[in-house]
Amino acid sequence: MSTYFIQKKPFVVPTDDGKYIGEHFGKASTGQSDLSIAHMVAPPHWSEPFQTPEFDEYTFIISGQKQFEINGEQLTLRAGESIQIKAGTRVRYSNPFDAPCTYISVCKSAFDFEKVNREAE
């Protein structure tokens, strides 16, 4: 039995908003529920509804900018910056800028559509 696994074919989550989500490890790709790691690309002028996830989410910005609305506060992260958002926090993610934003998202426990608690738009 090998002590490592190289992910060469992440699960590409189907989206209808132009966002790329390539899950390398997590429920959809490897079946693990303790952690998920995904490569993401948010296109220019993208946004999603507010949500209150039941998992911690860590975001590391590789290129571009990403906007966060957290409990009424708005902030922008740029390349090289990262953030931890704790479970139970109401947050909205967006890219209101003119360039794509490439980033890595780590969720602990793994991202789960049933536990993200997205609000209706």
Image: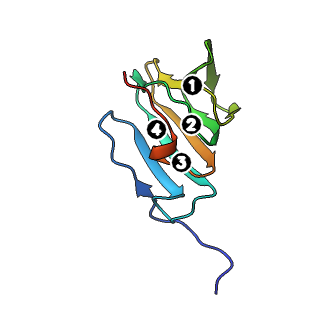
Q: Tell me whether the residue at label 4 lies in contact with that at label 1, contact meaning CB atoms closer than 8 angstroms.
A: no
Q: Nearer the viewer, residue 9 or 92?
A: 92
The residue singled out by tag 3 in the image is: 111
Query: Disc 3 to disc 1, how far (Cα)?
Result: 15 Å
Q: Position of residue 71 (x, y in %)?
A: 63, 17
Badge 1 marks a residue whose secondary structure is strand
Examine the image and state in which quarter residue 103 appears: top right
Badge 3 marks a residue whose secondary structure is loop
Badge 4 marks a residue whose secondary structure is strand
Q: Is residue 119 left or right of residue 25?
A: left
Query: Disc 3 to disc 4, how far (Cα)?
Result: 16 Å
Q: Position of residue 92 (x, y in %)?
A: 52, 24
State the mark number for residue 41.
Answer: 4
The residue singled out by tag 1 in the image is: 91
Mark with earlier residue (4, 2): 4
Residue at 54% across / 28% down in the picture?
64
Q: Tell me whether the residue at label 1 lies in contact with that at label 2, contact meaning CB atoms closer than 8 angstroms.
A: yes
The residue singled out by tag 2 in the image is: 53
State the mark number for residue 83.
Answer: none
- Figure check: 75 above or below 78: above
Query: Disc 1 to disc 2, how far (Cα)?
Result: 8 Å
